[in-house]
Amino acid sequence: MNVRLAAFVAALSGLSTTAAGGSCPFGYDKVAAVKEQDRQISSELYDPSSCDVVDYDLVKTDLEILMQMSQGFWPADYGHYGGLFIRLAWHCNGSYRRADGRGGCDGGRIRFNPEHSWADNTNLDKALRLLKPIKRKYGDALSWGDLIVLSGNVAIESMGGPVLGFCGGRRDDVDGTSSLQLGPTPEQESVAPCAEDGDCKAPLGPTTLGLIYVNPEGPMGVPDPVGSAPQVRRTFTRMGMDDRETVALIGGGHAFGKTHGACPTGAGPSPLEDPENPWPGTCGEGAMKGKGNNTFTSGFEGSWTATPTQWSNDYFTGLTTYEWEKYDGPGGHVQWRPVPDTTPPVRMLTADIALLHDESYHNISLEFAANLTALDEAFSHACSALIAVRDGIKILGVSEEEAVALAGRPRSAEQQKTLGYSGSYCSDSATLSNKYFELLLNEKWTAVSENEYQAEDQDIYMLDTDLALLDAPELKTIVEKFAEDEAAFKKVLASAWAKVMSADHFDANGY
């Protein structure tokens, strides 16, 4: 039985490699890269003995040391690399688009063009260079995709942020072929041309080719926060994010680090123009040319909070408390500053101010400003549990509808208890119905352990990976469909089960 199928069968029985405390719903916590294969696809056959095993706790320890080991070739902002690695992990994952499942950090293609040369990824080659000694230490057992994601997690945790779940098992691509349709490339132009760069439509993810989501200066570079808000929503929706996740990810990510743009002449040649020494910088002299205060990354300059190496909800308190005015930043782009200005100075971009000009975003921002715990939970959830569910679907080679149907399988309460859980959502595991979906939608669920929830006043239980189905708009729609139509659920489940049960024998895509 192949690794992918074994992992899924484990998930079907509620099992993971770390039993009840597992953070990855498909049991991939300990399984790292598979050697000598360029991609994992649904029809692929491979032997689990070809997998190496990584102690991710040791990797985390190495990353924790690296965070505060500022190096001469790229000095750390404020003595801590946290902001840089959060940006690397976000930009590696943020290329994901829901329309066709392309993008994301599985494959680690941010190392290759076209992603490597995107304007939004300026100077992330330095972050990859910082990680090379750790990658070299663990070799093929640790994929670049896993290392990049883990570096972001450790960065957040090392600066006092919430502890994030981690699901290993990403596999590295040999090149950037699978990202060519993300653009800007001839392949992208042939299948999904962007009529007006700055207002790109689905299936393209961002509004501007080469950026992760929207132009931070505003639509088409115009500093209009009212117009920016709907662009933010459309772009994050294409990534499968709802409003709460969107606000948590923006504000949580901007709790750390700073923008770099005090150099008006730019970062210098891109990897397409100078593969050996990309983005060397054009400002400053000597050893600090293009580094430190002379760095150019985005053309904007400054930090979002006064404590850019500490986790807090200061981004939201500042955003919702201060009055903000536009001004021309030192890099020639419009930014926003408080009135009166603060010491030390804090700065926002138009895409940040946009959160104040949308009722839903504004209300969520006010909630996070008043309640750090709510931000902790929302940010942690958006970064881990939900991403793990989506990664699992992608790893398995099943559709979203099939994955949701498989989640509704009967589960024996006795078996769940032997695995360390409190029980199941059903008392009769011999009957197949759509009860799972009805309960998931209609009951009030309260956490009783790290990853288990109980229905109010009832002896029935769900896992965090069950509730995660409600947090992704596209998955919740499927849950609602199955709750209303038991026949549809049974039909999809039968097809999905046949596909999974035969996946290690032949290509079952015809099922």
Image (cartoon, rainbow, N blue to C red):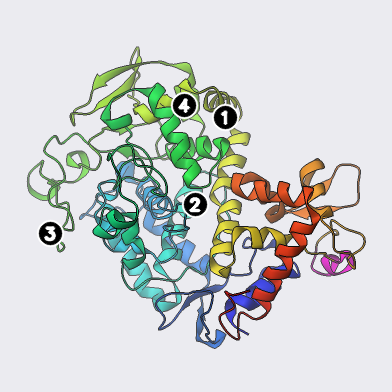
Residue at 14 percent across and 63 percent down: it is 276
Q: Please tell me whether mark 1 sits on a helix, a strand or a loop.
A: helix
Q: Position of residue 208 (x, y in %)?
A: 31, 42
Give the residue displayed 10% in from the left and 44% down from the top.
282
The answer to whether residue 408 shows anywhere in this view is no
Quarter placement of the N terminus: bottom right
Q: Tell me where the magenta segment starts and ends, as one range.
A: 412-420
Q: Mark 2: which secondary structure? A: loop
Residues at marks 2 and 1 touching, judged by CB atoms closer than 8 Å = no
- Label 3: state its secondary structure: loop
- Earlier along the polypeptide chain: callout 2 or callout 3? 2
Q: Is residue 319 above or below residue 169?
A: above
Query: Image height check: is 411 above or below 292?
Result: below
The residue identified by callout 4 is 355
Identity, as a three-letter code, of the amino acid under mark 3 = Asp
Where is mark 2, residue-wise?
98
> At 89% from the left edge and 65% from the top edge, which residue is drawn?
431
Q: Is residue 77 left or right of residue 255?
A: left
Cβ atoms at labels 4 and 2 below 8 Å apart: no
Q: Is residue 322 visible?
A: yes
Q: Is residue 167 left or right of residue 87?
A: right
Left or right relative to 455: residue 92:
left
Amino acid type of the residue that numbered disc 1 sits on in the rendered structure: Phe
- 223 and 55: which one is in front? 223
Label 4 or label 2, whichever comes before in sequence order: 2
Q: Earlier in the sequence, mark 1 or mark 3?
A: 3
